[in-house]
């Protein structure tokens, strides 16, 4: 919901499900925000990420797509500095508008990292204090919370919020700090349809402000709806990087499933897994 006086992008438009083949390129800054080169991550056993090379742009929603266990969270944790790199490199490219390095990146992990004994409003005051920001007036703060769908929960303790509201609160803190690169790990997981719609709107507004929005998901419907660009991982390897239109072309020749599902099957090895009907109890 965009709010008069404090829309994240200054405008609101009804959502429409657009055909991927008709989606026009986004206008504006296409400079790289994230650059990953030959990145490999190992723990004690086999590599969990192998030779990843990819770029992520400002002014775009990039979906990091893949099944559970593909390496999405590990890659995101590396990008925000929570994991070390075994080989290769990755860097955040700061925008040329003077954004400060210590607050240029906002991270919303899959787990809820909030202060349970602080209210929603107090979280924003804490961000303002930590990053030495001018405090919003009460009226402007209310409009900001309303733009993020948190106004009705402003004085609620974070411990009392639902999973979806906690994620929205973490996103609000990242936006308030002035982050130009937003790294969101499975932000749609566990949300009801209304919560998903709200978050999709926020993600699109942040993109339209020229920010880099990197969103991980294992859901094809989410990626199809919000992505300007796709990065697909499978078993720790990069199997696709490009636009949704290019991705769909991979599956159009199969003539089965939806175009997105067919494309995902074309780049994933998941179809080689054993079928459950092999274990129906009738065979030794």
Image (cartoon, rainbow, N blue to C red):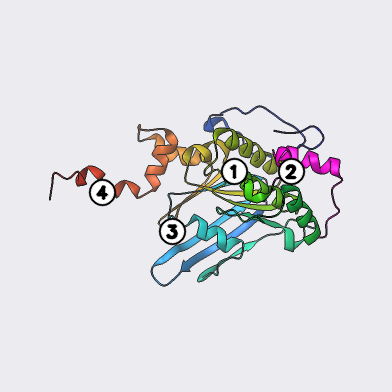
Q: Nearer the viewer, mark 2 or mark 3?
A: 2
Label 3, secondary structure: give it: loop
Q: Between 107 and 25, which is closer to the camera in this rendering?
A: 107
Residue 280 on image: x %, y % = 19, 43
Vertical placement of 146 versus 118: above or below?
Answer: above
Q: Residue at x 53, y 29 (%)?
A: 19
Q: Is residue 85 visible?
A: yes
Residue tagged 3: 236
Alpha carbon of mark 3 to alpha carbon of mark 4: how far? Answer: 20 Å
Q: Earlier in the sequence, mark 3 or mark 4?
A: 3
Label 1, secondary structure: give it: helix
- Residues in magenta? 132-156
Q: Quadrant of the N terminus?
A: top right
Q: Label 3: few (<14), some or many (≥20) within 10 Å?
A: many
Q: Earlier in the sequence, mark 2 or mark 3?
A: 2
Q: Label 2: few (<14), some or many (≥20) within 10 Å?
A: many
Vertical placement of 257 versus 158: above or below?
Answer: above
Residue tagged 2: 154
Alpha carbon of mark 2 to alpha carbon of mark 1: how far? Answer: 15 Å
Label 4, secondary structure: give it: loop
Alpha carbon of mark 2 to alpha carbon of mark 4: how far? Answer: 49 Å
Side of 3 where 188 appears, left or right: left
Q: Which mark is residue 164?
A: 1
Residue 73 on image: x %, y % = 51, 57
Q: Nearer the viewer, mark 3 or mark 4?
A: 4
Q: Which mark is residue 274?
A: 4
- Quadrant location of residue 192? top right
Q: Between 25 and 73, which is closer to the camera in this rendering?
A: 73
């Amino acid at each position: 919901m965009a709010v008069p006086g404090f829309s994240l992008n200054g405008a609101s438009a009804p959502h429409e499900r657009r055909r991927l083949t008709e989606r026009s390129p986004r206008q504006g800054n296409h400079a790289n925000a994230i650059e990953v080169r030959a990145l490999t991550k190992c723990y004690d056993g086999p590599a969990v990420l192998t030779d990843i090379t990819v770029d992520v742009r400002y002014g775009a929603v990039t979906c990091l797509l893949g099944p559970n266990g593909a390496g999405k969270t590990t890659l995101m944790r590396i990008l925000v500095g929570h994991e070390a790199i075994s080989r290769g490199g990755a860097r955040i490219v700061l925008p040329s508008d003077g954004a400060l390095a210590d607050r240029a990146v906002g991270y919303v992990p899959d787990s809820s990292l909030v202060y349970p004994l602080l209210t929603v409003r107090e979280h924003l005051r804490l961000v303002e204090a930590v990053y030495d920001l001018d405090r919003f007036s009460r009226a402007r703060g209310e409009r900001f919370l309303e733009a993020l769908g948190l106004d009705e929960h402003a004085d609620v303790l974070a411990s009392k919020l639902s999973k979806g509201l906690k994620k929205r609160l973490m996103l609000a803190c990242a936006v308030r700090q002035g982050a130009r690169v937003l790294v969101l790990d499975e932000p749609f997981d566990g949300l009801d349809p209304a919560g998903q719609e709200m978050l999709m709107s926020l993600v699109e507004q942040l993109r339209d402000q020229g920010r880099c929005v990197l969103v991980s998901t294992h859901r094809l419907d989410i990626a199809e709806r919000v992505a300007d660009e796709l990065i697909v991982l499978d078993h720790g390897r990069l199997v696709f990087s490009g636009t949704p239109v290019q991705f769909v072309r991979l599956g159009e020749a199969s003539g089965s499933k939806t175009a997105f599902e067919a494309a995902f099957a074309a780049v994933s090895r998941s179809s080689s897994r054993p079928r459950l009907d092999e274990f129906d109890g009738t065979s030794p």
